[in-house]
Image (cartoon, grey):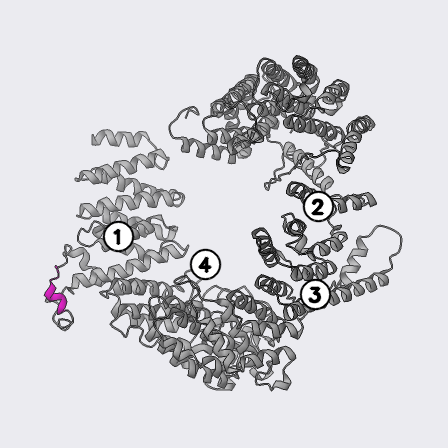
């Protein structure tokens, strides 16, 4: 494979990715595979053509490969190691000889980089310059870090002679070339920077005087050069080189500071913006380089560079891990570096401060500020080679420096306040820069924002029309995106002042202000945390913290505890104050509609699990449920759900042993039951979980049976039991439902009074039944949960009022919103009755069941999804035995109508409820399967597809677990195939029957001919078998698609029929179904227990007399082999069977079959599934 070839680029990319994945194993010779190391250096040389400026993807993957391998090996020429070590193996001796090519490799690598740089150069065709000229494309921006990382990886692991030769080549290139500064110049600067660090003595000696001389010559050649506002690319390119040279080895560069500063002094007076930016970066790089903790010790195996070949063989230590006692050599800034930084600071900072003072005095009219951002990207993959560990340590040290909080002084406070004033300036440019600097400062001092509270509140109180700029500036400051937005800070004292001030501010109609207010509302709604109210530290935490303490002085723990309690009380008081002010503002002020929304969002996000809202919030929320604004109504529902969560009364649970429940159900003594087995049980149906099975003959019929501990609302039991298994206590021990108004708390009285007024319910139903977006409305879980909470708290006291509109809403088939509203209310009622006593639940379902029947009769194409959602949601996390009224009404003759849509919808709704408890509904599955069997060959396609989907749920619990013997409780897949396969046998015995054309007369008399004989209709046995096959194929296809279990043995029974009928010319639906079935069966995982059956059935089809079936099965075999190759190769007889089938089909009498078999054989040989052995070649020779 040649890397400079233009063919099969994706194959090359995939191969390179694979090499990167095994690079560690390739160089280390794990598990005796030492031969792999001998391929590394040839691969290095072979991949160099992949550095191609015309192919970004290939260039990127090449750099990635070179970097991955270079980090693992010392790039040292050890070809003379054989003279000192006679115990080298043949592979090691060969590898040592290959290392002689390392020098050539690095020089060739630089040649490819130089070519890449020359091809990356951009030419500016315009005479004028713009700030946009420095903008680079995404590809150009990504190229520089790739070059830097790869070159650093190679040169950082190279020996001194190799580095010296490479540095000499680079210096010659830099001295003889001139590039533009944007793309190519940046790449050259990147290389110069790297070599100035790893080979700084020679590179700085040659290149730094060269660059300084060229800059001085340029300044001498041009008159009044400092006043020019534009400079040519030559000058800018030299500045790019200088900007990177000052980042060289700090120990060496210190000797050249006196040479650089005079040139920087002149450059600092230039008016050109780009020159000023480069000068700022030069000074910043220089100070950063002299004052930062850093390391040059990035070599993976330092011993290989410090010791001669007579003592160490580098190739033996390829891929070596870093030992725990390894040390890293650090360059710690010393006194000399501090003096250099101090000198630079005093040289340039005072003049800049004087300019700022003159500007603030009005002497200057304009000024420019620059920003620099630096990000450190951490890799998620942890590797343990030394070079990577060193890099990670450097990054960690940078993070520590960044996160260390400096001392906040009075000067810092003064700067903070000045920046705040500039952030609300009249001029937008000043505001933008000041806000960015202010947030940078707040990032450095993250707890200083409360000091700005007074000024923020003052600006929010201004008239937004008169003081537009200040008001807009403060909103931007609150909104601007940083790690912690000022509008959502976790400080109750700050929030208690800023949020009410924002809510009371005067809204401007200007678009910018409206957008900022809407944005702040979204930020509060989407990014507000659950604010901390009380801090509670347990005694054990204190004990363990004291055990970790090493200081000898004593702590006043009691004083700390009292201070914590005072802070908790203060937080609670501020919380109540904030909520009260928001409610008061809404009730007493005539707020704009946007501020109404903002207030509701604030109250929603102030809902706290450990502190209740005052009753005034509840009163506000319930009345907003019938607000004229649809947005306000939606927000009111969210707020009501938060209030209900705060008022939730805990349900009592009892810890029980599930085996005791088994004994109770069986009429035995629970005391004799074995202990809870936990998860140490076989998965699936067992004696200890059969009490969870739904059985209509055993459903509760009175309160005593209703209170028995044999009902469970979770999915527990199939795979084991929790150690503390709990069931709900009897109804009498649960929170009281039938309470008087006096027994309710103030919140509950407010809610009850609202819902107890019929006119409020009428208005609520009217609003909820409105269509917001025609054809795009969805089932509202918020409304459903609101009704559920009302039912859960107040029982059936409000049931009459809520159900009073249901009949009218359901009977209106023309309005989609009416059905949606009815569905949401009915779902909430059924879910809210979870903990009701028996009689109350029975009476409720006595009213709801007729509504369900009415809904099934009035469902439309637009509302069928709502009804399916209704029953699925109502049955979710419920015990089916306590909801048997729902399941039984859905089982009432679902295919009772001649209308296929109505029948499909009934099955769809039945699936929704049934699918929530599949493994617990075995009896329902048996009943449903017996009912559906006569209808599996239904003439309507939509109904057949729905029947197929229903079969998926019916057989979902038919699982096999290896190593366990499961009980047969649910319907079995094998029994179903035994039922249908005899009916489908006719499809292989007869030729396909073309459909008879329908005449106009026959269509008009279709209903009259329903009772005619099968000979007078199209319902022949063959046609019925085709329809039955379509249903079964749909079931199998989407079972494979939905679950990850793969193929079952029974699925392959359909293979001959599908291959036979795939090319059906008379029935397009049948052809598509067969193709889809074959595709899914061939791609699915086929486990070893099914492989014999699969290959046997494929072999059977390959011998059928129908050439189309043979042609189809070779496709199945091809995909089956490639998707299950490792499994097939695990058994020689399976591999031999595949070979036998393919070779036999190569001699088929039909050319289409032979061509496909040849294609499959080629693929099998190409991927080494079959090897071109002498035996195989002799076989072909004999056949030829």
Residue 688, position in %: x, y? 49, 72
What residue is disc 1 on? 1072
What residue is disc 2 on? 443
Q: What element carries label 4?
A: loop
Question: What is the C-alpha distance between the residues marked 4 and 3?
Answer: 62 Å
Along the polypeptide, which appears first: circle 3 or circle 2?
2
How packed is label 3: few (under 14 Cα within 10 Å), some, or many (20 or more)?
many
What residue is disc 3 on? 578
Question: What is the C-alpha distance between the residues marked 3 and 2?
Answer: 26 Å
Residue 724, position in %: x, y? 60, 69
Q: Quadrant of residue 709?
A: bottom right
Along the polypeptide, which appears first: circle 4 or circle 1?
4
Q: Nearer the viewer, mark 4 or mark 2?
A: 2
- Tell me the residue at 32%/60% (across/down): 1035
Return the residue found at the far front.
Answer: 466
Along the polypeptide, which appears first: circle 2 or circle 1?
2
Q: Nearer the viewer, residue 1133 or 651?
A: 651
Label number found at residue 414: none
What residue is disc 4 on? 963
Question: What is the C-alpha distance between the residues marked 1 and 3?
Answer: 64 Å
Residue 171, position in %: x, y? 62, 15
Along the polypeptide, which appears first: circle 4 or circle 2?
2
- Tell me the residue at 76%/46% (across/down): 416
The stretch drawn in magenta includes residue 1004: yes
Q: Nearer the viewer, mark 2 or mark 1?
A: 2
Q: Give the range drawn in magenta.
A: 997-1005
Q: Quadrant of residue 972?
A: bottom left
Question: What is the C-alpha distance between the residues marked 2 and 1?
Answer: 61 Å
């Amino acid at each position: 494979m040649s890397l400079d070839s233009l063919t099969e680029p994706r194959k090359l990319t995939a191969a390179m990715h694979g090499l990167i994945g095994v690079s560690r194993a390739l160089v280390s010779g794990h598990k005796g595979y030492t031969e792999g190391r001998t391929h590394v250096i040839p691969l290095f040389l072979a991949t160099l053509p992949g550095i191609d400026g015309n192919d970004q993807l290939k260039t990127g993957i090449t750099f990635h490969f070179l970097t991955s391998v270079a980090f693992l090996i010392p790039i040292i020429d050890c070809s003379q190691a054989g003279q000192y070590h006679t115990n080298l193996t043949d592979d090691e001796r060969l590898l040592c000889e290959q290392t002689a090519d390392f020098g050539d490799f690095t020089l060739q690598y630089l040649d490819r980089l130089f070519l890449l740089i020359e091809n990356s150069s951009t030419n500016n065709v315009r005479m004028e310059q713009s700030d946009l000229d420095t903008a680079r494309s995404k590809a150009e921006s990504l190229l520089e870090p790739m070059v830097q990382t790869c070159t650093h990886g190679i040169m950082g692991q190279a020996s001194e002679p190799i580095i010296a030769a490479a540095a000499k080549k680079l210096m010659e290139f830099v001295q003889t070339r001139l590039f533009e500064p944007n793309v190519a110049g940046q790449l050259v600067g990147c290389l110069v920077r790297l070599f100035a660090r790893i080979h700084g003595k020679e590179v700085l000696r040659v290149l730094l005087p060269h660059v300084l001389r060229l800059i001085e010559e340029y300044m001498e050649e041009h008159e009044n050069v400092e006043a020019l506002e534009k400079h040519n690319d030559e000058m800018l390119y030299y500045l790019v080189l200088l900007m990177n040279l000052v980042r060289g080895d700090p120990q060496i560069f210190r000797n050249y500071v006196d040479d650089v500063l005079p040139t920087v002094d002149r450059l600092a007076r230039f008016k050109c913006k780009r020159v000023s930016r480069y000068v700022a970066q030069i000074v910043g790089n220089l100070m950063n380089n002299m004052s930062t903790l850093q390391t040059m010790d990035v070599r993976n195996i330092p011993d290989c560079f410090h010791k001669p070949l007579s003592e160490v063989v580098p190739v033996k230590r390829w891929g070596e891990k870093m030992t725990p006692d390894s040390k890293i050599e650090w360059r710690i800034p010393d006194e000399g570096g501090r003096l250099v930084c101090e000198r630079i600071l005093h040289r340039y900072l005072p003049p800049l401060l004087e300019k700022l003072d003159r500007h603030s005095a009005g002497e200057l009219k304009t000024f420019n500020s620059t920003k620099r951002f630096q990000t450190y990207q951490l890799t998620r993959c942890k590797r343990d080679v030394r070079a990577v560990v060193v890099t990670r340590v450097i990054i960690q040290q940078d993070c520590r420096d960044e996160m260390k909080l400096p001392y906040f002084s009075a000067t810092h406070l003064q700067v903070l306040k000045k920046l705040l004033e500039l952030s609300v300036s009249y001029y937008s440019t000043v505001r933008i820069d000041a806000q960015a600097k202010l947030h940078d400062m707040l990032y450095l001092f993250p707890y200083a924002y409360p000091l700005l509270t007074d000024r923020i509140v003052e600006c929010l109180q201004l008239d937004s029309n008169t003081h537009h700029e200040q008001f807009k500036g403060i909103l931007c400051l609150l909104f601007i995106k940083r790690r912690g937005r000022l509008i959502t800070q976790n400080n109750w004292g700050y929030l208690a002042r800023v949020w009410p001030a924002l809510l009371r501010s005067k809204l401007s109609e200007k678009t910018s202000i409206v957008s900022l207010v809407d944005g702040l509302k979204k930020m509060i709604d989407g990014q507000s945390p659950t604010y901390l109210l009380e801090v509670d530290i347990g005694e054990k935490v204190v004990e363990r913290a004291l055990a970790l303490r090493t200081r000898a002085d004593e702590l006043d723990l009691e004083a700390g505890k009292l201070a914590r309690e005072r802070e908790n009380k203060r937080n609670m008081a501020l919380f109540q104050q904030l909520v009260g002010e928001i409610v008061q503002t809404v009730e007493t002020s005539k707020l704009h509609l946007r501020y109404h929304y903002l207030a509701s969002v604030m109250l929603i996000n102030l809902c706290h699990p450990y502190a209740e809202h005052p009753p005034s919030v509840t009163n506000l929320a319930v009345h907003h449920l019938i607000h004229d604004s649809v947005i306000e109504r939606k927000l009111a529902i969210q707020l009501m759900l938060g209030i209900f969560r705060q008022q939730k009364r805990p349900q009592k649970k009892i810890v029980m042993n599930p085996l005791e429940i088994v004994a109770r159900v069986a009429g035995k003594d629970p005391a004799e039951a074995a202990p809870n087995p936990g998860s140490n049980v076989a998965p699936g149906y067992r004696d200890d979980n059969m009490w969870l099975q739904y059985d209509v003959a055993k459903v509760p019929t009175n309160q005593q049976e209703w209170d028995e501990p044999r009902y469970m609302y979770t999915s527990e039991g199939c795979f084991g039991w929790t150690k503390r298994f709990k069931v709900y206590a009897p109804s009498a021990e649960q929170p009281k439902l039938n309470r008087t108004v006096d027994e309710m708390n103030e919140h509950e009285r407010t809610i009850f009074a609202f819902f107890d007024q019929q006119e409020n319910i009428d208005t609520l139903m009217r609003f909820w039944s409105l269509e917001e977006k025609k054809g795009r409305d969805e089932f509202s879980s918020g409304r459903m949960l609101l009704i559920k909470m009302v039912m859960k708290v107040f029982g059936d006291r409000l049931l009459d009022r809520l159900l009073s509109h249901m009949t009218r809403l359901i009977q209106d088939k023309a309005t989609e919103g009416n059905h949606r509203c009815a569905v949401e209310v009915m779902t909430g009622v059924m879910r809210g009755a979870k903990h009701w006593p028996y009689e109350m639940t029975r009476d409720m379902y006595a009213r709801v069941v007729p509504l369900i029947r009415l809904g099934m009769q009035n469902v439309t194409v637009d509302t069928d999804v709502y009804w399916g959602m209704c029953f699925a949601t109502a049955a979710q996390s419920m015990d089916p035995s306590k909801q048997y009224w729902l399941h039984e009404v859905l089982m009432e003759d679902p295919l009772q109508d001649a209308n296929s849509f109505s029948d499909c919808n009934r099955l769809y709704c039945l699936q929704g409820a049934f699918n929530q408890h599949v493994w617990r509904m075995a009896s329902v599955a048996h009943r449903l399967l017996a009912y559906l069997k006569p209808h599996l060959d239904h003439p309507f396609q939509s109904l057949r597809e729905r029947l197929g989907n229903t079969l998926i749920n019916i057989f979902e619990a038919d699982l096999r677990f290896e190593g366990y013997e499961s009980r047969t409780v649910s319907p079995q897949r094998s029994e179903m195939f035994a039922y249908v396969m005899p009916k489908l046998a006719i499809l292989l015995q007869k030729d396909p029957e073309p459909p008879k054309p329908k005449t106009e007369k026959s269509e008009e008399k279709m209903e009259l001919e329903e009772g005619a004989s099968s000979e007078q209709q199209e319902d022949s046995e063959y046609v019925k078998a085709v329809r039955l096959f379509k249903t079964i194929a749909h079931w199998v296809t989407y079972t494979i698609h939905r679950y990850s279990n793969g193929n079952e043995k029974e699925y392959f029974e359909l293979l001959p029929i599908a291959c036979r009928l795939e090319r059906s010319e008379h029935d397009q639906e049948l052809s598509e179904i067969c193709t889809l079935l074959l595709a899914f069966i061939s791609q699915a995982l086929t486990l070893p227990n099914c492989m014999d059956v699969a290959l046997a059935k494929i072999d059977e089809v390959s011998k059928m007399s129908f050439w189309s079936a043979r042609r189809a099965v070779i496709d199945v075999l091809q995909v089956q082999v490639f998707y299950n190759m490792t499994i097939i190769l695990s058994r020689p007889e399976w591999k031999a069977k595949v070979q036998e089938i393919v070779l036999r089909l190569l001699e088929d009498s039909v050319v289409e079959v032979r061509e496909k078999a040849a294609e499959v054989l080629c693929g099998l040989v190409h991927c080494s599934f079959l090897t071109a052995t002498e035996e195989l070649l002799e076989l072909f020779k004999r056949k030829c």
